């Protein structure tokens, strides 16, 4: 795994107490989660982040696309968008999957008392 680093070195999201809960600043990256039932290693990769309050305040865990807990072993930064990815002003980045989507496809969602933005696909609406 050339650019893969041990999960123990992965950046973690941070959390600040706010009225009514916590504000989390998510840090997203590509994670490798081995699965013996998967024949293609690329099937073991997904966007991941540290969810600081997954198991209660101060009891975090790794979370992935689709809002489920992961057990990654390695991580790497998400690929850059590159010069060919012309973004229009009506596109915004989904906090959950990192994809650029039309602004009208994003909605605020609250999970574990934390507000974030998610596209229709990540919300299960599309």
Image (cartoon, helix red, strand yellow):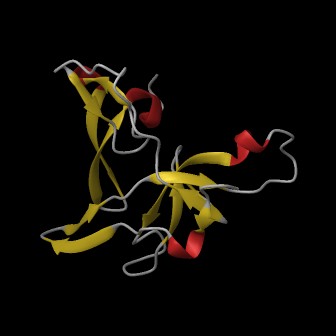
Q: Is residue 50 above or below residue 89?
A: below
Q: Which is nearer the eye, 93 or 120? A: 93
Visible residue check, residue 71: no
Q: Position of residue 31 (x, y in %)?
A: 58, 54
Q: Is residue 117 above or below residue 73?
A: above
Q: Which residue lies at the image location 30% right of the left edge and 62% below the top edge?
A: 113
Residue sitting farthest toward the bottom? 58
Residue 71 left/right relative to 30: right
Q: Which residue lies at the image location 52% right of the left edge and 45% below the top edge?
A: 65
Q: Is residue 102 above or below residue 116?
A: above
Q: Which residue lies at the image location 46% right of the left edge and 22% below the top edge?
A: 126
Q: Which residue lies at the image location 37% right of the left edge and 20% below the top edge?
A: 84
Tell me which corner region of the image, top left, top right, bottom left or bottom right, holds residue 11.
bottom left
Tell me which corner region of the image, top left, top right, bottom left or bottom right, holds residue 104.
top left
Q: Position of residue 36 (x, y in %)?
A: 87, 53
Q: Which is nearer the eye, 124 or 70? A: 70
């Amino acid at each position: 795994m050339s650019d893969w680093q041990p999960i123990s070195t992965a950046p973690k999201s941070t959390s600040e107490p706010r009225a009514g809960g916590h504000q989390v600043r998510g840090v997203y990256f590509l994670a490798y989660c081995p699965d013996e039932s998967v024949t293609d290693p690329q099937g073991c990769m997904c966007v991941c982040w540290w969810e600081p309050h997954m198991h209660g305040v101060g009891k975090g865990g790794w979370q992935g696309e689709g809002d489920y807990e992961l057990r990654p072993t390695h991580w790497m930064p998400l690929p850059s968008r590159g010069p060919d990815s012309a973004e229009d002003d009506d596109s915004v980045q989904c906090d959950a999957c990192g994809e650029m989507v039309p602004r009208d496809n994003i909605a605020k969602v609250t999970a574990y008392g934390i507000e974030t933005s998610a596209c229709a696909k990540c919300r299960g609406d599309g």
